[in-house]
Image (cartoon, coloured by chain):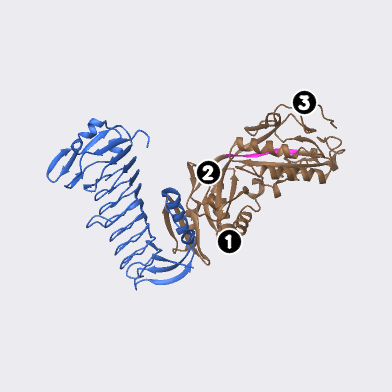
Chain colours: A blue, B brown
Amino acid sequence: MPDATTLMLRSPLTQLIESDGLTADRLAGLSALEIGRLPVWSGRQRLPLGDVFDVRGGRSAHVRIAGDVGHVAGIGAGMTSGELVIEGDAGASVGAGMSGGRIEVLGSVGDDAGQAMTGGSLVVRGSAGNRVGAGAPGASRGMTGGEIVVAGSVGAEAGARMRRGLLFVNRDAGDHVARTIIAGTVIVLGRTGREPALGSKRGTLVAVGGVDVPVTYRYACTYEPPHVRVAFVHIRRRYGMTIGPEVVAGRYRRYCGDAGTVGKGEILEWIST
Amino acid sequence: MEHRGVFIEDTFAEAFPMRATRLIITAANERWARQAALTLTGFATSVIACKCEAAVERPLAPNETPDERPGVSVLLFAMDTDSLGKRLVERIGQAVLTCPTTSCFDGLPDADRRIVAGRALRAFGDGFQGSKVVAGERYWRIPVMDGEFLVQESFGVVKGVGGGNFIILGTDLRSTLAAAEAAVDAVATVPGVILPFPGGIARSGSKVGSRRYKSVPATTNDAFCPTLRPLTPSSLPSNADCVLEIVLDGLDESSIRRAMRVGIEAACRPGVHAITAGNFGGKLGPHHFHLHAIMGQSQVAEAPRA
């Protein structure tokens, strides 16, 4: 990473830290000193970021965060451009509301990763908690653009109320994946949990590792969906995910639903040959 | 200038600006990708009567295509963007959408100017169509009887060049045709260029206007017709009884230059007496491809002339 700004955790965290504006685009215009003066919150206490992190570099659109920041919430929230790499675990709401740039977490993340994002890409090399790419509580929409790629598993309600975009889960997804999805594509290579894609309007759930299709869906046909191939090839090429040729070129059972809504959604269940 | 015993005339090809696009057609196998491409590029030899010029650029291996299926790239040229857009909709709709197992993608992703031909085709889905956005690109899913036809929404457009050419003057039909075929095979290795005439070769080179029929825009190039040698001012050397022309359209000047060089190189073989090119005195087309500059300053010699 060329001339990156590095934030090194000074000591292990035991309390939750709320970061505010810890994004690559915001830090791009700031010196190390100015970055150190940015506020973070520990409960009610406001702290300078420099008390938590040792800041090196500055004035770079490439940012690295080193150390276990599993207790830090909101890293990358609202990011619009640049590159942010978190070298360990990260807390909740990573990349929430982001609209551009790329965030890569080399560990796992907490709940609400990519919440209501509108663009950019969020890559999690570990697993993610609940509500990946979903909407904020009470919001009518989840993510409306961008791409989320999770190399591990995700918790419940991944992609809930998704309006547009791509969510790829390399392993298992918890219950209620793609719940009330409006549009967009959710791909799960592992097993999906209970009640997938309930209330879907016209989104797509691609289930490779096994799915219990809800009774409100109707079988259409078994075929080779061309858009799924394009999505898999893109994910493999851009994010380096290993996706077998039998999946990329596979046949899928298409179920149309949810009959309780306009019913233009679909579940595509991979069948092994 | 002489190259391998063939006289290279000190002249130039005069070419014109056109608007160009590249399509990537994929299918379940090479057979159907090629079939769709051949059908799409059929009846597209000249904008004079076909409204566009098109041909297969090259086959694509699966790792070169967006869906990792076998594919073919096709170049299409028209006089303006509006006309190009109409031809795209017509030809994708009638030749690719109709062909089993195909999908159709943009081959100029970096082009700033776009034609939303895929979007125009979505209406064939009669409301049952859908779209997906992958990597910022929208793809339309049109339900058809073998599953779905996937077409990218927009296709890039660039300022291309049409009408590059070189003319092969040979002893007889057999040797001239062999030289032209060799030229076509050589040009096929150059990306960004197509040869829009049948098999890449034009036997009916034309001149602007007519001696006899005022309403006809183009007529036979009588100066290069061997049967008319004593009946009209002839440009043929005495030992040339056959002439074939290679016309090139390219995405840019450098591609055409490269293609002309390898094509002329391949055509310089026994049975060929001279290579020349067609132009309009340099007054019409802004792109000039000088044969000597393309072939480099090698041997210079006088060739027998009529």
Residue under circle 1?
B99
Q: Residues within 10 Å of mark 2 (few under 14, many from 20)?
A: many
Residue under circle 3?
B300
Q: Amino acid at mark 3?
A: Val
Relative depth, front residue between A153 and B58: A153
Q: CA distance from mark 1 to mark 2?
A: 24 Å
Left or right side of A213 for B74: right
- At x 66%, y 41%, the residue is B248
- Part of the protein shown in magenta: B160-167
Q: Amino acid at mark 1?
A: Cys
Residue B199, given in percent of the width and then of the height, sits at 70, 49
Of the 4 image quadrants, the one containing the N terminus of chain A is: top left
Callouts 1 and 2 in the same chain: yes
Q: Is residue A137 visible?
A: yes
Q: Residues within 10 Å of mark 1 (few under 14, many from 20)?
A: many
- At x 25%, y 34%, the residue is A55
Question: Within the magenta stretch, is there residue B163?
Answer: yes
Q: Secondary structure at mark 1?
A: loop
Left or right side of A89 for B29: right
**For the residues carrying marks 1 and 2, which lies nearer the camera in this image?**
1
Relative depth, front residue between B12 and A268: A268
Residue A35, given in percent of the width and then of the height, sits at 24, 34
Q: Amino acid at mark 2?
A: Val
Q: Earlier in the sequence, mark 1 or mark 3?
A: 1
Question: Within the magenta stretch, is there residue B106?
Answer: no
| Residue A156 position (above or below residue B21) | below
Residue at the extreme bottom: A215
Q: Secondary structure at mark 2?
A: strand
